[in-house]
Each structure stands twice: as structure tokens, then as C-alpha cells.
Image: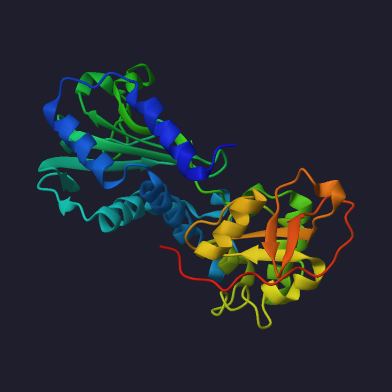
Amino acid sequence: MLPFDEDIQAAARIAQQGLMPDDPQLIEVCERIRLLDPSGKRFASVLRDTIDQLLNGEVTGRYDWKTLYKTEKTHAGTLVEINLQREFKFDDGIAMDYQIAGVDVDCKYSQNFGGWMIPPEAMGHLCLLVWADDYRTLWSAGLLRIQPEWLNRGNNRDLKLTIKAEHRDKITWLWQEAPLPENVLLHMDPVDRAAVFAPASGQGRLNELFRRAQNRRIGRNVVRTVAQQKDYMKRVRGNGGSRSALRAEGILIMGDYDSHRTVARNLEVAVPGEGEFVSVRVVPAGSRHAAAPQVELDGQNWTVAEEDDPACAAPLLPTHTAAA
């Protein structure tokens, strides 16, 4: 599996293979967005954060889109529109939501691919069409100049229309089916997830999370949802947090520090991104691990433990420096 950033770049290359329409304004908007976010990482982060904002796990303990109320799902499009504008500092539009490269652009989001609701006032304008699916862990974003003949006739109460399936090939994709940062709780084995939420204390739940979700990028929103405490970050770190509690079991919890990322790369496990943690059980490297990736910590070589390796206390992680 490709690293997350490389996966997004691959999706962008696939999207760019399509022919660019003869529309100078669309080309200008496309180039401006790609200049602001060449890899798509910022766009993906906004979508992940927006879904997590709706779930509000710290208060509700929710992690599944299906548990949202209908009114919350309806509000998702507005939040995506607002959060993208905040992230990229798009100017307010004159007739549409934004001005990008001096061009009016409307923003439409749908959890269901093709479900974008196009208002009558968007006819002839550019629309930024955004889709994200937490179950498939994918997202797409593309541009389309709205033409009435490309829209379904069936009107809803607001006179909004959808794009005919046969005309979705007119969309110029910025990123197509790019990887969405994983909702770890949603995609955990149900038995493991139940075990994570079983302890009464937030600290106990976090400890179980890092035991059972090893070698996976765990974001702050996941930590917040599991801990359901205001001081959730303190519950991860050493000095009484999961990092010190699980050390006796041989589990390292790496954060978004340069030194921690180096450890993860040397062990060839998932590398934590900004605001993320990755846990992994390690053992001293012996002859049976000769071909395995290794890292030197506390003057000894360590490697990722195999299932039948006996547990031993993990080394201390190097003194961290903030990531660039």
C-alpha cells in the first residue's frame, strides 16, 4: 500500500489524464486550486475534520455517519463549504459561494456520489463538486460548468437538480477517488471496537485502542472520541498516559515528531502525520529477525514483534522535536 500522500498524488495524476475542457475560467480555477494544494492533503484533511466535526465524538462518542441525525447530514454541505473557505481563504463570491482566481464558483458536497443538488442560480456557473465516503475511505473533487441539458428534470421543493449519470464524464477531476484519512473506529473489527469502548475510564479505553489498533494512523479526533475527556492528549503521552502504561507490554506510541517519524520509517510501519499517533509492539532484534527492519533505541536494535514473540518492556522513544 502506498503512503497516504503518495496515494493522493496518484489519484491526482489519474484525474489529470482526462482532457481539459475548452473553458479558460475552469482551467484558471483548476490551476489555482492545484497550486494551493498540489498533493490534495489539505483538501483531504478538511473533509476528514468536517466529518469528525459533525460526529462530535468527544461529546457524543459517535464515529459512524449513519448515527447522525437527518438535520446534521443536511448541514454537512454547509460545513464543507465553510471549512474549505477557511482553509484556502477563498474570497466571497458575487453570485456563488466563492471567487477563485477571480471566477465565481459554487461549492456542492454530497456523501453519495452524484447526489450534488444544483440550484437554478448555478446555471452557467462553475461548481466545485465534492464527494467523500467514510465507509470506502475515498473522496473526489472536480469542476463542472453547469448546463441545463446535463441535469435531471425531477425537481425537489427547492427546485434543485442533480447531474445526469451519463454527463458526469464532463466533470474535470482535481482528485478522483483519492484516499480519505481513515476513520479507525469505523473500520476496526467489531470485537476490537467493543473491547476499546468497554473500560469505564477514558484512560482505559485509550490504552485498549493503542493495543488493538497497531500500525494504523490514529488521529486526534479518534483519541478525543475514545477518551471523551477535555485533557485527552495528556492521556496519550508519558507520565501516566498510554505511552507509559503500555511500555511494559512492549508497545511504542509514536507521535508527529521528526524523531518519532524516523523510528516509524526505520521500522517500516505507518508514519504518523500531523496530529496522529501510531502504536506498534517491538522486541529486541534477534537472529530470527535478521531480515526484518530495525531501529536502534537505548543502544539496542529493535524490530516489530511477531505474534509469538514474548512481551518485554519497550525502549524509550528519542527526545522529540516538533515536526517541520
Locate residue 116 relative to residue 104 in the image: left or right: right
Q: Is residue 322 above or below residue 42?
A: below
Q: Quadrant of the C terminus?
A: bottom left
Q: Quadrant of the N terminus?
A: top right
Residue 228 % position (x, y):
60, 73
Of the pair 186 and 27, the residue shown nearer to us: 27
Of the pair 15 and 238, the residue shown nearer to us: 238
Q: What residue do we see at 86% from left, 63% from top?
A: 311
Q: Is residue 211 above or below residue 162?
A: below
Residue 233 % position (x, y):
56, 74
Q: Is residue 294 above or below residue 142?
A: below
Residue 53 % position (x, y):
45, 61
Q: What residue do we see at 64% from left, 50% from top?
A: 269
Of the pair 210 and 316, the residue shown nearer to us: 316
Q: Is residue 105 above or below residue 152?
A: below
Q: What residue do we see at 68% from left, 61% from top?
A: 296
